[in-house]
Image (cartoon, helix red, strand yellow):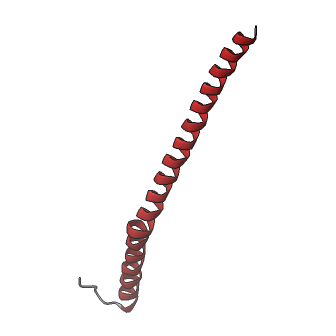
Amino acid sequence: MLKKHRQTSFLIDKLHKGFVVTCIAATIYGLGVAGFRAYSYFTVTKPAREAEELRRLKLEEAMKDGKTLSG
């Protein structure tokens, strides 16, 4: 009877360890993806938005003054 309990406990311990390792791996992967997306936002997306906003403001200012924007 005791031997059967050990086998069951051993199996449950192995399954639990596998689940924990899988959760840790998923967390590390998720943090990596989130970090890459944050890096991409601050180095690519945000500067492009700011440049577009600046270009749009210059265009509006030029149209308000009746000038044409060259370049």
Residue at x 41%, y 66% (from the top left corner): 45
Question: Considering the image in quadrants, where does the C terminus appear?
Answer: bottom left
Which residue is nearer to you in this view: 7 or 20?
7
32 or 55, which is in the foreground? 32
In the visual, does 66 lie left or right of 34? left
Left or right: where 61 falls relative to 5: left
Q: Pick whichever, 52 or 33, lies toward us.
A: 33
Against 67, residue 44 (above or below) is: above
In the picture shown, does residue 2 fall above or below 19? above
From this view, report whether residue 46 is shown above or below residue 54.
above
The quadrant in which the N terminus is found is: top right
Q: Residue at the spot x=40%, y=81% of the render?
A: 54
- x and y percentages locating residue 55 in the rendered image: 36, 79
Q: Tell which residue pokes out farthest to the right in this image.
A: 1
Res 41 → quadrant: bottom left
Residue 39: x and y, percent?
A: 44, 64
Residue at the far top: name it.
1
Residue visible at 53% across and 42% down?
Answer: 26
- Expressed as whole percent of the image width and height from the top left, the position of residue 65 reads 37, 92
The quarter of the picture where residue 60 lies is bottom left
Percent from the top left, x then y, of residue 62? 35, 87
Q: Residue at x 40, y 73 (%)?
A: 47
